[in-house]
Image: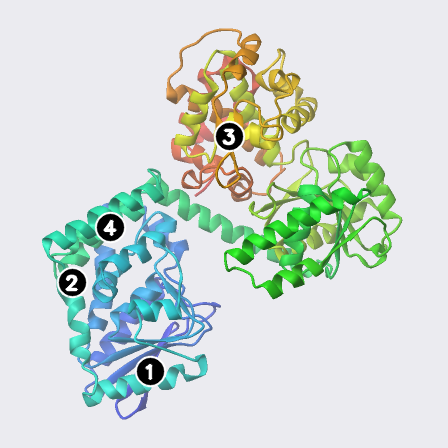
Amino acid sequence: MIYEGKAITVKPLENGIVELTFDLKGESVNKFNRLTLSELRAAVDAVKSDSSVKGLIVTSGKDVFIVGADITEFVDNFQQPDEELLAGNLEANQIFNDFEDLPFPTVVAINGIALGGGFEMCLAGDFRVMSAKAKVGLPEVKLGIYPGFGGTVRLPRVIGADNAIEWIASGKENRADDALKAGAVDAVVAPELLKDAAIDLVKRAISGELNYQAKRQPKLEKLKLNAIEQMMCFETAKGYVAGQAGPNYPAPVEAIKTIQKAANFGRDKALEAEAKGFVKLAKTTVASSLIGLFLNDQELKKKAKVYDEQAGDVKLAAVLGAGIMGGGIAYQSAVKGTPILMKDIREEALQLGLNEATKLLDKRVSKGKLSAVKMAEALNAIRPTLSYGDFGNVDIIVEAVVENPKIKQAVLSEVEGLVKEDAVLTSNTSTISISLLAQALKRPENFCGMHFFNPVHMMPLVEVIRGEKSSEKAVATTVAYAKKMGKTPVVVNDCPGFLVNRVLFPYFGGFAKLVSMGIDFQRVDKIMEKFGWPMGPAYLMDVVGMDTAHHARDVMAEGFPDRMKEDKKTAVDAMYEAERFGQKNNKGFYSYEMDKRGKPKKVSDAQAYEILKPVVYEQRELSDEEIIEMMMVPLCLETVRCLEEGIVDSAADADMGLIYGIGFPPFRGGALRYIDTLGVAEFVAIADKYADFGALYHPTAKLREMAEKGQKFFG
């Protein structure tokens, strides 16, 4: 053994060829943490000083190659002073440089996922051979940063600037055939042939058949583009990528600027340019939020795994109530491999549900994401029925009938008597108390909430709601089923609106106040979209449906009268009474016309302003900043209350629920991280400016205490 550590070993193979293997002890994957980097330093030094070594192959002892840097270490690292962070980055890069400069050929055998720093390690080798099942890429922009181990320097010199910009700015994972086509790897082989192929390549390089020095040289030099080619390449790319990424995600454009800046430098100076830009991005709130988002997502997945041991097996599901929502649930279950019965009392509703599932499956086939055979299998897995005939075999039932407690209770009570004793019953209610619905059941311990978001196939979140009598097994089985459907489950405790709608309606309450002050709703929409929301509040209510919003608002007002009950008629009331239900009947705050693709397109409608006149009680002038504050303070404060009252288990759960459920701007990290970014004391001071507007704007005593103590929700 030439070198042996906890993450890396180097052992001789044959005829002067050695194998450097990444195999991080105690972990299921390889990643670049402090330990791995320090051992790579030692391993490179060991082989460099061994005169018997003639060639080296790099392998992995795990199913993946290297998944990237250890993101949990980013949080601490990125808080270092700029100079220290820069020095640490350049020190790490020197390890990759020294590996690249070894006095013999190197071949990297990519057996599985090689992302971020893992792929940058591959790029430092002379040759790359890849398993047909592996994937490579540089996804750092998804964390608000860009590659920091030489990716912006080596990749453009290996595959060309145009291809490198596309790979880095999109952050996508690339399959083996695409990597070979681009020139990112030298060969693709079947997984079982990978090591032999790597040894063969290194032998050919040792013999001189392959010129490894010539392969290495372009990575050490300037980019081979003249001044005009550089201008055409980089300026065009910056314009296009800026349009795609938007103003709130600076990393993709910064990556292009760095590649451009380093184009006329050799490797070492180019790496300095990369490191300086990396430090600049690492210090942004966007990076902080997106890294936090990634870590929150990991925490959520760990929590969901905890439920696996208690979960019952779901081999057959059922949805009660067809139509658009029922059809969406049936589609999602079937396409992910769980057969489902779709029950309704009307034939036309069943047809609507089947049409919805067929439309969604058709779309996947047309995009090449599903074969016609798989589509047929999925459709066959949805069994429409007007009777309860086969319900004796069902493991989990999702009730998705009209949002009315008496009707839901009647349906749930009826189906409970027709299923096996351990079948789990769930309700896809958006606001009605699970404990209230459970009162109609003989086995309330087998019942919980399973709240899907519309459209089901697109929205990643499922709220799993624990009622007063819900058993851990019922909750665990529902979590497992949600995961099986490809969804991200967040377990919450019961209250009106649960987490997402409880937090959303104070946001709508802020909007109602703005309209009552004479603020143009279209202006509010534009400001909130610029803030980062996928759509403004007026447009969102049109999409949700004014009847749905009106009903849910009343439920919330009954549950939280101190802050959600309106003392005057509001914009939602005016629209509801005028039967302007939004996209459902093509008129709400906006009117709707069909575009060329058959999708509803919003247009301004003067009649909406006439309808709103009676609910405008005063005229105020407000800045854009004040409008943002009036919208965001109620939402953030309600999120704080949900955390304090134990409706959600953690700040991470709360923020992920809002990002996945209502499209809270990801680059802001969620409501609680947004408060952290502003500073808790600063947020409380902002809220206090609007104290006269009522309890929606009043911070809790605990939040004031956090402000006084300088505490945060994260870190």
* Residue highlighted by disc 4: 256
Q: Earlier in the sequence, mark 4 or mark 2?
A: 4
Q: Amino acid at mark 4?
A: Ile
Residue located 59% across and 32% down the image: 544
Can you tell which of label 1 and label 4 is closer to the viewer? 4
- Residue 141: x, y in percent? 35, 51
As rendered, which of 695 and 566 lies closer to the eye? 566
Q: Secondary structure at mark 4?
A: helix
Q: Earlier in the sequence, mark 3 or mark 1?
A: 1
Would residue 276 be visible to someone looking at this image? Answer: no
Marker count (numbered): 4
Whether residues under marks 3 and 1 lie with C-beta atoms below 8 angstroms apart, the answer is no
- Residue 663: x, y in percent? 50, 38
Q: Amino acid at mark 1?
A: Ala
**Quarter containing the C terminus:** top left
Name the image quarter holding residue 420: bottom right
Q: Earlier in the sequence, mark 2 or mark 3?
A: 2
The crowding category of the residue bearing disc 2, from other C-alpha atoms within 10 Å (few below 14, some 14 to 19, many at least 20), is: many
Q: Secondary structure at mark 2?
A: helix
| Distance from Cα at disc 4 to Cα at disc 3 | 35 Å
The crowding category of the residue bearing disc 3, from other C-alpha atoms within 10 Å (few below 14, some 14 to 19, many at least 20), is: many
* Residue highlighted by disc 3: 636
Whether residues under marks 2 and 1 lie with C-beta atoms below 8 angstroms apart, the answer is no
* Residue highlighted by disc 1: 198
Return the mark for residue 267. 2
- Residue 588: x, y in percent? 57, 23
Image side of residue 517 versus residue 353, left or right? left
